[in-house]
Amino acid sequence: MRRRPAIPWGARPPGVPAGKGVRVVVVDSGVNPLHSHIGGWIDGARIYRGEDGAVHRGPDYRDTTGHGTAIAAVIRHVAPEADLFALKIFNGALATTPDVLEGALSYALQAGARVVNLSLGMEAARYVPSLCGLCRDAARAGIILVASARNGSKGASVPASYDEVIGVKGDGRLGEDTLMYRPGGPCECLASPWPRSLPGLPRERNFRGNSFAAARVSGAIACLLEESPDADLDTLRELLRKRYGEKRDAKS
């Protein structure tokens, strides 16, 4: 019989890891710090392409779509003591250009990131050498990158499929507090694709997708890093395997 390893989910007793001291950078549509699931002020910035065609940084990371806030809400629920930092790259539509994504990742490397949540993806056929190089730089610096597979993609997507990135896909059969670690494929983690529920909003009208599976994994990794603050990517993968790898009950 399969056993489903559970991630931390919600309030927990003192002494149980909650991501304390771990900065998680959320690269998305920004965050609404006043949302009840966020719990107060967080720091952040906006990365955008200006009229001059260059990538710039500004202070306004307010979320206008709700997606980034929903991502941050899941991370906050899994790792309530993590230090969240919002990097807004989506403004309206949940789409951006590779140079803006690269600008956000470059800034995350400078902003004290320990974990970077990238709930986004491109088709793997679109090879972006500079993005791949930034992911290598992050891994060398001890920064853990977590990326979701592109929704609806039948093949691999980037950056989730890069060796330097923890790739994640959603699986609707899994409970909201379940994480499965299965190395060997383009996405080594599986988790629930649902965000946190909102009072009065039917589940089918809320967001859904691989993005929220990635948020669960980012939060779980923040909790692991609180316990093992010096873990690099290889060590972190081993921790994921030991805690969330598929196990089977012994036969009598």
Image (cartoon, grey):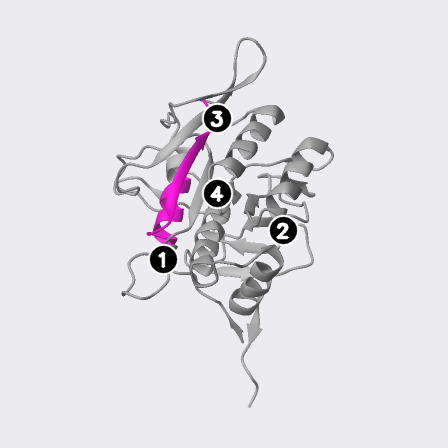
Toward the top, the furthest residue is 52
Q: How far apart are marks 2 and 4 (CA)?
A: 22 Å
User: What's under tag 3, amino acid-wise?
Assistant: Phe
User: What's under tag 4, amino acid-wise?
Assistant: Ala
Task: Tell me the residue at 44%/54% (across/down).
Answer: 222
Tag 2 and tag 3, C-beta contact below 8 Å: no
Q: Can residue 221 be spotted in the picture?
A: yes
Q: In the rendered image, which residue does mark 1 sit on? A: 18
Mark 3 or mark 4, whichever is nearer to me: 4
User: What's under tag 1, amino acid-wise?
Assistant: Ala
Q: In the rendered image, which residue does mark 4 sit on? A: 113
Task: Tell me the residue at 52%/65% (across/down).
Answer: 244
Q: In the rendered image, which residue does mark 2 sit on? A: 187
Tag 3 and tag 4, C-beta contact below 8 Å: no
Return the disc, 2 or 4, that comes first in the chain's sequence: 4
Is disc 1 surrounded by few (<14), some (14 to 19) or many (20+) residues within 10 Å?
Answer: many
Toward the bottom, the furthest residue is 252
Return the disc, 3 or 4, that comes first in the chain's sequence: 3
Q: What stretch is highlighted in magenta?
A: 71-91
Return the disc, 4 or 1, that comes first in the chain's sequence: 1
User: In the image, residue 148 lies at what x, y percent?
Assistant: 56, 43
Q: In the rendered image, which residue does mark 3 sit on? A: 90
User: In the image, residue 89 lies at what x, y percent?
Assistant: 49, 27
Q: How far apart are marks 3 and 4 (CA)?
A: 19 Å
Q: How far apart are marks 4 and 1 (CA)?
A: 17 Å
Element carrying mark 4: loop
Mark 1 or mark 3, whichever is nearer to me: 1
Residue 21 among those drawn in magenta: no
Residue 49: quarter of image: top right
